[in-house]
Image (cartoon, rainbow, N blue to C red):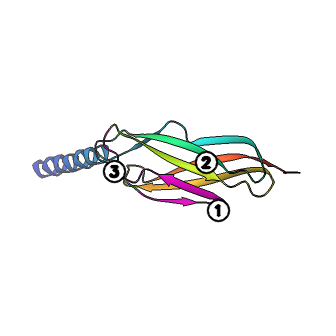
């Protein structure tokens, strides 16, 4: 019985320790995760800024950003964002072709507790004519 209690105590200590490690990681808190451009004239690139705060206790580092098509370009804060610090991801959509409606995803990879965050831009491209 004593061995079982010691083993149970050891398991509890390990679980609590792992939980504390997860809580100390960096973490995103975005002001918004989707931006609707509404109606866009064809041939007019449009941009949206996604502002975020590091709500974790470790520096937040964005390692890469992947887009769902070549029609999306991104710029982002490349230096580590300290606890409580803010960063910006700018997403630019090239409205070259008319589209009745679009929704594009942008995957942000980082060292955060949630290592992949997905942001969205959407809208409608009106024909230039």
| Residue at 33% from the left image edge and 41% from the top image edge | 56
Which portion, as a residue range, is magenta? 63-83
Q: Position of residue 78 (x, y in %)?
A: 40, 54
Alpha carbon distance from label 3 to label 2: 23 Å
**Residue wearing tag 1:** 69
Q: Position of residue 55 (x, y in %)?
A: 36, 38
Per the image, the residue denoted by label 2 is: 120
Upstream in sequence: badge 2 or badge 1: 1
Question: Which element carries disc 1, helix, strand or loop?
Answer: loop
Q: Is residue 10 left or right of residue 61?
A: left
Q: Position of residue 60 (x, y in %)?
A: 35, 49
Q: Secondary structure at mark 3?
A: loop
**Label 3 belongs to which residue?**
80
Give the residue drawn at x 36%, y 52%. Answer: 79
Q: Residue at x 54, y 38 (%)?
A: 32
Alpha carbon separation for disc pair 2 and 1: 12 Å
3 horizontally vs 66: left or right: left
Relative to 25, 42 lies left or right: right
> Measuring 58% from the left and 50% from the top, which residue is drawn there?
91
């Amino acid at each position: 019985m004593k061995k079982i209690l010691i083993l149970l105590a050891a398991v509890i200590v390990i679980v609590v320790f792992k939980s504390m490690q997860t809580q100390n990681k960096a973490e995103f808190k975005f002001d918004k995760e989707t931006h609707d451009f509404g109606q866009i004239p064809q041939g007019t690139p449009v941009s949206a800024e996604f502002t975020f705060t590091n709500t974790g206790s470790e520096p937040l580092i964005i390692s890469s950003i992947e887009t769902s098509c070549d029609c999306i370009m991104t710029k982002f804060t490349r230096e580590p964002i300290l606890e409580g610090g803010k960063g910006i991801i700018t997403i630019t959509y090239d409205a070259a072709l008319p589209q009745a409606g679009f929704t594009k995803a942008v995957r942000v990879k980082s060292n955060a507790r949630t290592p992949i965050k997905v942001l969205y831009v959407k809208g409608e491209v009106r024909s230039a004519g």
